Image (cartoon, helix red, strand yellow):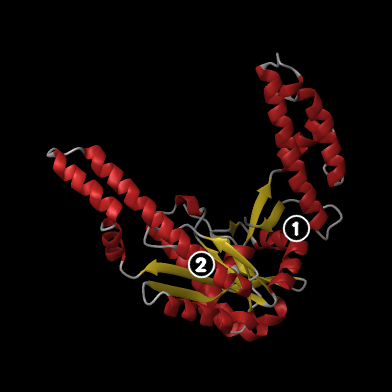
Amino acid sequence: MDRQGIYIYGFIPNHYLTDIKTILIESGIYSIEYGSIAALVSDTMVDDIEYLNREDLAYLLVDHQKKIELIMSTGCSTIIPMQLGTIVNSGNDVIKIVKNGLRIINKTFDDIADIQEFDLVVMWNNFPDLIKKISDTPQIRIMKEEIANKGSYDQADSINIGKIIKKKIDEKNSKVNLDIMNSLSSLCICVKKHESMNDEMPLNSAFLIKKDKENSFIEMVNQLDIKYENLLRYKIVGPLPCYSFYTLESKLLNKKEIEKAEKILGIDAYKSESDIKKAYRAKAAHAHPDKNNTISAIDNDDFIEINKAYQILLEYSSVFKDSPDHKPDEPFYLVKIKK
């Protein structure tokens, strides 16, 4: 049976709450506050998005983005999105995520105060026509004539022609992509490329731009449209929260694993990152496979365990460093920018 959890959409400075109170109520969202930070959440009966079918997952994604963007549209531009599908057990878990991620949340508020994301998708306006033009080039035409003159069909010939056409399309897409990126790069702080769905899409990227560059960015896209004489079509989506650059993710750390890691490295988890690194190097020096050509499978397993312990203690050290508590209580959440 499903149990009720809390779904986290993102975080805002809590001084925005008065302005967006009506929107939150209408959207079924409420806030859980800690200090100057408000987590935007709703109750959910979903335990884990891994068990959702494709249709329900698509609905969740649309709902997640729609609600964040609705809040942003009210003038609450400083909003940090949480990773899609972040569900915790209770309000205490939400508070712990804020406390364990306090430093990075406040830093991100500063980082995104004057910036926003625009997503740009570029498609060929008439892709079949592009393929036809490539197929009519002398190289392809000669190959087709040679195949016809052979008088017998060979599937390998068709495959070779297909590969050449694909290569030509890739070259054209790369050229268009490079030209557009060069034209827009001076107007943005950062670019993140997204996967293109197919060969019809030379570009699918997210652009991080300052708010005062929005009009210049859109105008440059319009100029590119003129330059390519309607060969391409452009879809601009934005302004958006900084999904591609500043989405937060959290990871629940297991206390037993932390204690086990302490024993393996022989160091307290509350020690500094540099102390943990020293302890790791000392242990790893004895267990590293390169140190002994006749190393056994058991020794190799030890080395793997040492590396795992090192990563666990580094993660916990990050939580300890970022938390306002002298020694944070359970649960322990590692909070970071999603890469």
Q: Earlier in the sequence, mark 1 or mark 2?
A: 1
Please identify the residue farthest to the top as the structure is shown: 294
Q: Quick one: SS at disc 1?
A: helix
Side of 325 where 137 appears, left or right: left
**Residue 329 seen in render:** no
Disc ID at residue 100: 1
Residue 43 screen position, x and y as percent: 55, 66
Q: Amino acid at mark 1?
A: Asn
Q: Is residue 6 left or right of residue 301?
A: left
- Closer-to-camera residue (40/65): 65
Q: Residue drawn 74% across and 36% down?
A: 309
Picture residue at 74% right of the left edge, 17% below the top: 292
Q: Is residue 308 above or below residue 82?
A: above
Q: Nearer the viewer, residue 199 or 75?
A: 199
* Residue under pointer 2: 179
> Disc 1 vs disc 2: which is toward the camera?
2
Q: How many marks?
A: 2
At x 69% / y 30%, what residue is drawn? 304
For residue 14, what is the image quadrant? bottom right
Where residue 186 appears, as percent x and y from the top left, is: 63, 73
Are discs 1 and 2 less than 8 Å apart at CB?
no
x and y, in percent, of residue 269 in the image: 82, 42
Residue 137 in view here? yes
Asked whether 251 or 299 is in front, the reply is 299
Q: Tell me the number on the disc at residue 230.
A: none
Dot 2 amino acid type: Asp
View extreme (left): residue: 151
Q: Quadrant of the C terminus?
A: bottom right
Question: How far is mark 1 from mark 2, CA to CA?
Answer: 43 Å
Above or below, 266 relative to 81: above
